[in-house]
Amino acid sequence: MRTTVTLDPDVEARLREVARERGVSFKEALNSAVRAGLMAARGAREYRTPSRPLGLRPGVSLDKALQMAADLEDAEIAHDLERGR
C-alpha cells in the first residue's frame, strides 16, 4: 500500500541511520520499525496499582485529613509564637 507519512526530522534521521547500518532501503527500515512498535504495543498491558487495606481503626475517617493536618500545623505555629521562636 502506498501512503504519505509526515515524520519528525529526528525520526527520519534515525530511520535513515538504521537503513544504512542494516543495508536496507528506507521503506524496509520504516516498515520494520512500525511492525516492531505494533508488536510491542500488543504485548503491553495496562498497569494497575494493587489496593491494600490501610489498617485504620474503626471510627477513623480520612475524609478531612488535610484539614486536620492544617489545624495541627496552625497549632504548632501558635505554640512556636508563644515561645518566641
Image (tube, helix red, strand yellow):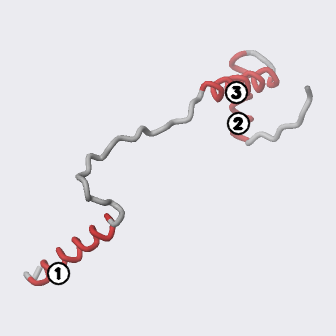
Q: Distance between the residues labelled 1 and 2?
A: 59 Å
SS for callout 1: helix
Looking at the image, tell me whether mark 1 or mark 2 is earlier in sequence order.
2
What's under tag 1, amino acid-wise?
A: Ala
Residue 10, percent from left and from top: 69, 39
Does 80 appear above or below 39? below
Does 81 appear above or below 57? below
SS for callout 2: helix
Looking at the image, tell me whether mark 3 or mark 2 is earlier in sequence order.
2
**Nearer to the camera, 24 or 70:** 70
Q: In terms of image quadrants, where is residue 13?
A: top right
Please name the residue shown 90% across and 33% down the image. 3
Q: Which residue lies furthest to the front in this view?
A: 58
Instruction: Give the label on residue 78, or none.
Output: 1
**Nearer to the camera, 76 or 40:** 76
Image quarter of the C terminus: bottom left
Q: How far apart are marks 3 and 2 (CA)?
A: 16 Å
Residue 31, percent from left and from top: 78, 24
Label 3 Cα neighbours within 10 Å, binned few <14 / some 14-19 / many ≥20: few
Please name the residue shown 51% across and 36% down the image. 47
Q: Name the residue under label 3.
A: 38
SS for callout 3: helix
Q: Name the residue under label 2.
A: 11
Residue 38, percent from left and from top: 70, 27
Please name the residue shown 10% across and 84% down the image. 82
What's under tag 3, amino acid-wise?
A: Leu
Label 1 Cα neighbours within 10 Å, binned few <14 / some 14-19 / many ≥20: few
Asked if the residues shown at circle 3 and circle 2 are in contact, with their CB atoms under 8 angstroms apart, the answer is: no
